[in-house]
Image: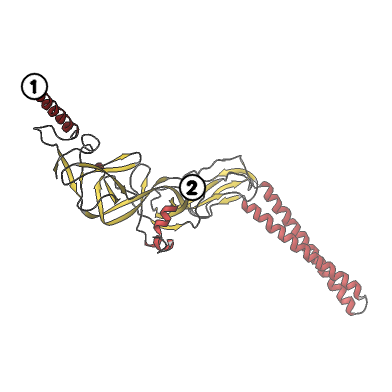
Amino acid sequence: MKTKALSILSIASALVVAGGLSSCGNKQAAPQGQMAPEIAVLTIQPGNTEVSLDYPATIKGKTDIAIRPQVTGFITKVHVDEGQHVHKGQVLFTLDQVQFQAAVDQALASVNSAKSAVSTAEITEQNKRMLLDKNIISEYEWQMAANQLAQAKASLAQANAALVNARKNLAYTTVVSPSEGVVGTIPNREGSLASPSSVEPLTTVSDNSEVYAYFSLTEKDLLSLTDGGNATIAERVKAMPEVELILADGSTYPYKGKVATVSGVIDNSTGAASVRALFNNPSGMLRSGNTGTIAIPRVHENAIIIPQKATFEVQDLRYVFTVNDSNVVKTTPIKVAPGDDGKQYVITSGLNPGDRIVTEGVGTIVRDGMTITPKQ
């Protein structure tokens, strides 16, 4: 009887251990009598989509001309104000003209004096020539008179040159706009000394009828642009679609632009090359110094596209939950193409057409190895 009791006890203990092992091996399985949770899944099918690659940009006018005086003098009048639209040749500043007008008057007096000297020398030379013709004087005396005439004419030419220079300096006291545009900051007002050597210009005139948006492409972007050397950058730039400009307030600029140039030099400090896109600016909405974001559209054909909410990140790596034929969830690493629309990712590796992925409960109720009831 004792032996029989021990055998029954051993069998019962074995059943308890087996039951415990079975429970440990199926931690993610649904409890007995409960169905696996219904989770939305997506069966992947290739499709076409357009995403944008975004790059920070700085706006500059087509021409930004620093206005500097060509002579030194005190500002006597400022004719324009900041932000004012001006035309080519319009007066911007007037400098003190007193000393320059005096220089013109002095140069003019020197010219008149030189003219009188030439007139006197001409009369003397003519008289000497007549006396020479009559053999009354020697040729030496006539030559001296001729030399004096030539010297007087040279002095007149020198005086005329000084007059031109004085008048030009006087004209420089009136500073005019070299082109049509918008006036920038005016740091110096009436009474300030203006000089060509000043670090700060009088102002800046920006032609904003068209603006340039400057942004940078990395070395990797440039290599991708040339498709491994199968095309030149110039060819790819010409074939680029129109780009959009996202303004600082998040709105989209109403006019699309075109990438115009790519710098031929990569900056060693940044590892990037400067790129310039041209935008029309008929209303003057954009000004030099504005910032924004250039959005370059990129079309993906026959691509694997999934919702961003179906992905999660761990240590800078991106994953999805795939579902196998037994409806068991598995963590799967993926890689995505650069650029997105905020809703979807274009997958470059990790998934294939026909795969099923979890699209809800990612990061909350879904765990690796759990069994689910898929719902489309």
> Which numbered dot is residue 5?
1
> Which numbered dot is residue 270?
2
Q: Residues within 10 Å of mark 2 (few under 14, many from 20)?
A: few
Quadrant of the rendered structure where residue 331 is?
Answer: top left
Q: Residues within 10 Å of mark 1 (few under 14, many from 20)?
A: few
Q: Is residue 190 found left or right of 324 in the rendered image?
A: right
The one of 256 and 321 positioned closer to us in this rendering? 321
Residue at image point 70% right, 57% down: 163
User: Where residue 303 sits: x, y (%)?
Assistant: 26, 55
Whether residue 150 is visible, yes or no, is yes
Location of the N terminus by quadrant is top left
Classify 10 as above or below 308.
above
> Which numbered dot is residue 336?
none
Q: Nearer the viewer, mark 1 or mark 2?
A: 1
Callout 2, which amino acid?
Thr
Classify 350 as above or below 140.
above
User: Where residue 85 sits: x, y (%)?
Assistant: 46, 49
The one of 331 and 262 positioned closer to us in this rendering? 331
